[in-house]
């Protein structure tokens, strides 16, 4: 099964928040210092503080390194550090890809080339640990695919090596071009360049959480307290739940209070013949409190005209209503099995690697009519025959 990590960035994203969330959700034996022991970047230490924000327990990561170490590093310098480290190849490749994406964004903002970019805050040891550490933890947790929520954008100004810049930072805007974002009434930098670069490079998609079976969740804490929300980032880890792809159909309805009941049978038959996917009749009370029938038809959009023609021709309705809706069908196959009463087709749906067999009603009915055996007995015999067939 595919193992997923979904980053829920309701208060933004930074490198240390991503790092803290993964450590919080991971195994107890995960030690960032051990995972990054092969990173040739000098002396540094990592401590993980357990804190609470708005009553939610979280991990706050503190990276300690000698001051001013590494400010002004170029992309080539950082790539050399990572390449020469004793880290898994996948961690090296992912980490370098994040820095290259960040360098491209900075180069665009400063209107220069990638090789000329000097990383200041992001070139410091703690930022390198954040980026390489997130990639190493994803590898250690065996994450196959990463997804993230839309990103919130605060407002105001923030100080950096270049001076005072607006929020969102220009590099963040460049990194998140094409990514769903939304403004919030928080005067603070919610998404940092490091957080944006990690998510944009590593995530396969942004939006709602994909269909998955959650196994663990972790919370990474940011530095500051926010006035209206816990300054946390949440990661949810689990296995992908295979959900069939949805297709669009039309739901066509009409309420009828003056059609003789005997005519509904032929109306249903002709609706199915016209391409209806499903037809249901439901007793309701209509206008003037009259007993009525709600006729609901599902059809594909190209078949709407044929369905409308049957409803107007075969019923007394003077109007219909319709709306698009989503329809999900299980993947299925058909198997023919032999019973003591004859051949029966069995349709088999698949859901989460489990089979859902069901004998075809028309076959069961035909054999019941010809043999005089109850239909349920024939259906049970068909299911037994299918299950025995699968065990062979």
Image: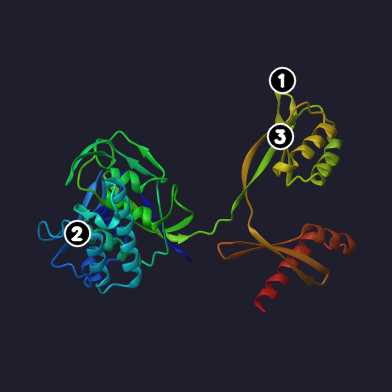
Horizontal and vertical percent for residue 116? Answer: 24, 55
In which quarter of the view is residue 301 placed? Answer: top right
Counting the numbered discs, the total is 3
* Residue 172 drawn above or below residue 348: above
Q: Secondary structure at mark 2?
A: strand
Number of residues whose C-alpha sits closer than 10 Å to that of mark 2, classed few (under 14), some (14–19) or many (20 or more): some
Q: Nearer the viewer, mark 2 or mark 1?
A: 2
Left of 221 or right of it: where is 286? right
In this view, the residue in front, 190 or 336, is 190
Q: Which residue is mark 3?
A: 253
Number of residues whose C-alpha sits closer than 10 Å to that of mark 1, classed few (under 14), some (14–19) or many (20 or more): few
Residue 162 — which label?
none
Q: Which residue is mark 2?
A: 73
Q: Quadrant of the C terminus?
A: bottom right
Coloring basis for residues = rainbow
In this view, the residue in front, 105 or 239, is 105
Q: Secondary structure at mark 3?
A: strand
Q: Which residue shows up at 75% across the image and 27% down it?
A: 319
Q: Nearer the viewer, mark 1 or mark 3?
A: 3
| Among the two numbered marks 3 and 2 on one chain, the one whose residue lies closer to the N terminus | 2
């Amino acid at each position: 099964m595919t193992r997923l990590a979904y980053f829920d960035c309701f208060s933004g994203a930074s490198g240390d928040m991503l790092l803290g969330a993964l450590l919080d959700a991971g195994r107890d034996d995960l030690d960032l210092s051990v995972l990054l022991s092969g990173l040739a970047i000098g002396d540094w230490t990592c401590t993980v503080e357990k804190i609470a924000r708005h009553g939610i327990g979280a991990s706050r990561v503190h990276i300690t390194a000698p001051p001013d170490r590494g400010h002004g590093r170029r992309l080539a310098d950082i790539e050399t550090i990572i390449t020469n480290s004793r880290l898994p190849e996948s961690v090296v490749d992912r980490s370098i890809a994040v820095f290259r994406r960040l360098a491209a964004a900075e180069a665009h903002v400063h209107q220069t080339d990638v090789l000329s970019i000097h990383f200041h805050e992001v070139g410091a040891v703690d930022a390198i640990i954040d980026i390489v550490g997130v990639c190493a933890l994803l590898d250690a947790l065996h994450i196959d695919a990463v997804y993230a929520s839309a990103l919130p954008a605060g407002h105001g100004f923030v100080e950096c090596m270049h001076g005072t810049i607006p929020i969102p930072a220009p590099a963040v805007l460049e990194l998140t071009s094409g990514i769903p974002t939304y403004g919030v009434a928080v005067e603070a930098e919610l998404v940092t360049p490091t957080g944006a670069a990690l998510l944009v490079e590593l995530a396969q998609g942004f939006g709602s959480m994909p269909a998955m079976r959650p196994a663990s969740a972790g919370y990474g804490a940011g530095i500051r307290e926010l006035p209206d929300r816990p300054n946390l980032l949440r990661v949810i880890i689990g296995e992908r739940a295979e959900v069939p792809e949805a297709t669009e159909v039309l739901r066509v309805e009409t309420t009828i209070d003056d059609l003789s009941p005997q005519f509904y049978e032929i109306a249903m038959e002709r609706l199915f013949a016209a391409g209806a996917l499903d037809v249901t009749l439901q007793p309701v009370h209509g206008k003037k409190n009259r007993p009525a029938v709600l006729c609901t038809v599902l059809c594909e959009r190209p078949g709407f005209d044929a369905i409308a023609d049957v409803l107007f021709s075969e019923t007394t309705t003077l109007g219909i209503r319709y709306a698009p809706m989503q329809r999900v069908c299980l993947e299925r196959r058909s198997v023919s099995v032999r019973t003591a009463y004859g051949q029966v087709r069995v349709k088999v749906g698949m859901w989460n690697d489990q089979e859902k067999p069901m004998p075809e009603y028309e076959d069961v009915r035909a054999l019941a009519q010809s043999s005089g055996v109850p239909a349920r007995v024939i259906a049970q015999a068909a299911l037994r025959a299918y299950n025995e067939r699968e065990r062979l």
